Amino acid sequence: MTFNQDSLKNDRSQDWRVELRNIIKNKDRLKLQRVRMNEVDAEKRVQSYVEVNSGLTAEQAVNEAQRCLDCANPTCISGCPVEINIPAFIKNIERKDFLEAAKTLKLTSSLPAVCGRVCPQEKQCEANCFYTIKMKTEPVAIGFLERFAADYERESNQISVPATATANGIKVACIGSGPASLTCAGELAKLGYSVTVFEALHEIGGVLKYGIPEFRLPNKIVDVEIDVLKQMGVQFETNFIVGKTATINDLREEGYVAFFAGSGAGLPRFMEIPGENYIGILSSNEYLTRVNLMNAASPYTDTPVICGLNVAVIGGGNTAMDSVRTAKRLGAKRAMIVYRRSMDEMPARIEEIHHAQEEGIEFLTLTNPIEYFSDEKGCLKQMRVQKMGLGEPDASGRRRPVEIEGSEYLIDVDTVIVSVGVSPNPIIPNSLPNLKMTRWKTIEVNEETLQSSIPDIFAGGDIVRGGATVILAMGDGRKAAASMNNYIQNIKTK
């Protein structure tokens, strides 16, 4: 293994001599190979909802923690939206003080067991690891270690609850119970506020419950994280739609002085192509929500979901992977991803794509649906697709798909799940006509404070960003909580 000494000299953000001495001191650590996650065999796991990744053993975790160089300038932290002290928790694992590692995580993260499973570390903290930047090799498996510490704490029945300040009696509300709101609620509870989370559905967890299947994120994991928030004093109201059940003004009259809007992006998008209303075509939002929250895959449910034999999922993100892998588990003989760009442009996590390939999912890349056909009863039977080429990069930085004339062909399908993006939930904006919105129908906020055009309303997560990741939503929740505290303290002194 080699390193580029010139790249160290050119790095003005740190003393390269300190890092060079650190490398020399830790030369034996540099020889260690990155750990591989233990997984359930593909043929076995597609027959159930067993979690695919089964976690690290204590020995594996300690060995991986030994790879951490404890850098003088830990750039991994700057890559984490919630600024976990990554070297500190990893060094606790190396010392086999696993419970202390979990406590370190909880100083800044309300959902460490969740993040250890679904956070795209490869694009964030691990992308900023010294190994990645300077050594051009595999980074420390930060995500695996985060999961290990959180799971060890849970399984040991020694779950720590973050300390909270003396209750100040000031009421604040978090709207929605996804990762942004849960994080905001936890941070405000630490500061002594009386926090209530309002959730429209019957289950707490937002996208963590309705959008992510149990084979990737078991509900029991989410429930444990939520229980910690309850022990911190956070109150939860389910089946409560802010803007319908009660308005913001109603809640103000009840004494709430500040609000965090984290109601997500639950409005699905469709492609608006011929035949899109045929029976058998549905959004990934509906499909996953019904399967994950309504037991719709059971033959005994009152609201069954279509379990097709030839299933096509349109899209290439993590939600598309979740949908197609769910379809496989529900009995699809042919489960396909239909994506208009190439594998290189696919936004899903590399791990999710790899797991899908292991499970027998077909990938029809550079392919786009242009029309659907039904039988005499209006049930989907075929789709016409068109082959695509790649042109110049578009605004996203990915090469723009270009139609190839004369390349159309038919595919037999009985179910199509459309996963081409989502729009923000419109209920809160529709109930607040003075709330400024962007042209993308997201809530307009101050980027530094996440404060909206209505001073006592702050917002973050997908209702501000559009469809984004769990960890970015959590980062917003943490930032908004600090801003809400400043806002409340300022109005108290006036």
Image: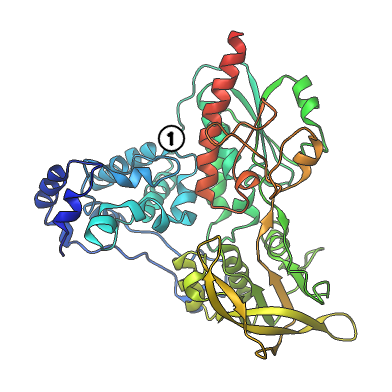
The residue at the point 71 percent across, 47 percent down is 441
Give percent across and percent down for residue 484: 58, 26
Question: Residue 143's quadrant in the figure?
Answer: bottom left
Which part of the image, by quadrant, shows the N terminus? bottom left
Give percent across and percent down for residue 181: 60, 39
119 left or right, relative to 235: left
Can residue 269 be seen here? The reply is yes
Q: Circle 1 sits in a helix, a strand or a loop, which is it?
A: loop
Name the foreground residue: 58 vs 321.
321
The residue at the point 52 percent across, 28 percent down is 482
Return the residue at label 1.
160
Name the foreground residue: 151 vs 309.
309
User: Alpha-carbon neighbours of circle 1 within 10 Å: few (<14), some, or many (≥20)?
Assistant: some
127 left or right, relative to 419: left
Instruction: Report the residue that reaches farthest toward the top.
Output: 494
Can residue 240 be seen here? The reply is no
Above or below — where is 488 with respect to 54? above
Name the foreground residue: 368 vs 126.
368
Above or below — where is 110 with respect to 44? above
Give percent across and percent down for residue 247: 80, 31
| Amino acid identity at mark 1 | Ser
Give percent across and percent down for residue 69: 20, 49
The residue at the point 63 percent across, 68 percent down is 323
